[in-house]
Image (cartoon, rainbow, N blue to C red):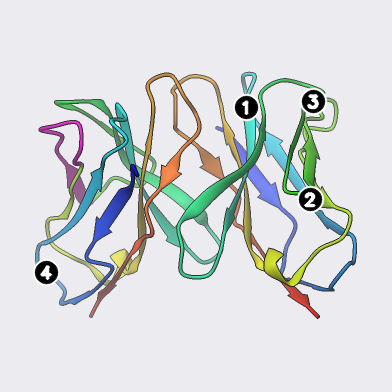
C-alpha cells in the first residue's frame, strides 16, 4: 500500500543545532507540504513543492529550508534550531491539481 | 488574507448526542472547504469537503454545508460515538494554489459512554 512516512517520530535537540526531518511518500504525488502544529494555531504552512527542483515558502518559513531532488522525498531542515521551533511537524502530499492532502503521522520536535 | 475561525473547545458530549462544531471563514476568492480529523497519535485525515456554494459534504455520518451567504461550513453529526473522540480541523483552499490549506485552530471532541 502507498504511504507517507516521517522520521524521526520524536526528537530532542539543543538550541543552535541543525536538524533534518525526513518525509518519504510512495503515492507518486507531485505536491508535497510541510506544516507545523501548535496549540491555538492549528496547522501553519512552512514550505511546499509542486515537483522536483521546485520549492516555495509558506506562511512561517523563517528558519526552515527544504529541497526536492526526487518525487518521493521532501526533507525539512532547521539550520539553527530555536526553542520557538518546538512543535509537531506534519508532512503531506497530494496529486497534481488536487487540494486533498494525505498526511504523515507527524514528527514531534523539542528544542531545549 | 484567508482565515478560518472554529468554535472554541474542548467539546464534551455523551454518546448518541448531537454534535455541531462551528466554522466560519474569510476568503477573497471562491474557496474549497474541508473538515479534517486527527485521532490521537495520528496525522490528519480528510473527513469531508465541499467545493462550491450550497454543496453538502458527508462521510461517516458527518455532514457540512457550504454556506456562502454566512461564510460558514459547520460540522454536524446526529449521534456521536466514543470512537468519534478526536480533534477536528476546518480548513480552506483559497483557489490560487493547489494544496495550500489555511486551517482553523482545531476543536477537541471527547465523547463519553
Both labels 2 and 3 in a single chain: yes
Give the secondary structure at mark 3: loop
- Residue nearer the viewer, B75 or B82: B82
Q: Distance between the Cα atoms at labels 1 and 2? A: 17 Å
Q: Is residue A1 left or right of residue A14?
A: right
Taking the magenta stretch, the answer to whether it contains residue A64 is yes
Residue B57 drawn above or below residue A83: above
Which residue is the site of mark 2? B22
- Of the image marks 1 and 2, the number of the one nearer the N terminus: 2
Q: Distance between the Cα atoms at labels 3 and 4? A: 47 Å
Tag count in the figure?
Answer: 4
> Which one is closest to the eye, mark 3 or mark 4?
3
Q: Chain of mark 3?
A: B
Q: Quadrant of the N terminus of chain B?
A: top right
Residue B6 drawn above or below residue B51: below
Query: Residue A23 placed where, x, y %?
Result: 24, 49
| Label 3 CA crowd tier, 10 Å (few <14, some 14–19, many 20+) | some
Q: Which mark is residue B32?
A: 1
Q: Chain of mark 2?
A: B
- Residue nearer the viewer, A13 or B80: B80
Q: Is residue B34 left or right of residue B70?
A: left
Q: Quadrant of residue B11?
A: bottom right
Q: Quadrant of residue A37?
A: bottom left
Q: Distance between the Cα atoms at labels 3 and 1? A: 11 Å
Both labels 4 and 1 in a single chain: no
Which residue is the site of mark 4? A16
Query: Residue A72 placed where, x, y %?
Result: 20, 37
| Magenta-colored span | A63-73
Which residue is the site of mark 3? B68
Query: Residue A43 placed where, x, y %?
Result: 48, 52
- Residue nearer the viewer, B67 or A74: A74
| Label 2 CA crowd tier, 10 Å (few <14, some 14–19, many 20+) | some
Amino acid at each position: 500500500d502507498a504511504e507517507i512516512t516521517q522520521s524521526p517520530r520524536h526528537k530532542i535537540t539543543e538550541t543552535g543545532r541543525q536538524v533534518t526531518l525526513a518525509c518519504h511518500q510512495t503515492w507518486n504525488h507531485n505536491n508535497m507540504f510541510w506544516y507545523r502544529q501548535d496549540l491555538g494555531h492549528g496547522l501553519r504552512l512552512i514550505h511546499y513543492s509542486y515537483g522536483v527542483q521546485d520549492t516555495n515558502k509558506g506562511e512561517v518559513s523563517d528558519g526552515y529550508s527544504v529541497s526536492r531532488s526526487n518525487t518521493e522525498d521532501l526533507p525539512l531542515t532547521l539550520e539553527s534550531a530555536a526553542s520557538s521551533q518546538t512543535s509537531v511537524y506534519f508532512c503531506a502530499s497530494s496529486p497534481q491539481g488536487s487540494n486533498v492532502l494525505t498526511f504523515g503521522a507527524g514528527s514531534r520536535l523539542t528544542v531545549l | 488574507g484567508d482565515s478560518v475561525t472554529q468554535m472554541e473547545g474542548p467539546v464534551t458530549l455523551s454518546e448518541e448526542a448531537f454534535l455541531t462544531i462551528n466554522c466560519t471563514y474569510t476568503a477573497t476568492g471562491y474557496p474549497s472547504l474541508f473538515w479534517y480529523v486527527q485521532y490521537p497519535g495520528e496525522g490528519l485525515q480528510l473527513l469531508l469537503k465541499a467545493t462550491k456554494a450550497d454543496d453538502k459534504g458527508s462521510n461517516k455520518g458527518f455532514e457540512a454545508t457550504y454556506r456562502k451567504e454566512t461564510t460558514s461550513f459547520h460540522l454536524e453529526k446526529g449521534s456521536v460515538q466514543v470512537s468519534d473522540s478526536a480533534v477536528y480541523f476546518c480548513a480552506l483552499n483559497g483557489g490560487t494554489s493547489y494544496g495550500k490549506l489555511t486551517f482553523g485552530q482545531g476543536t477537541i471532541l471527547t465523547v463519553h459512554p
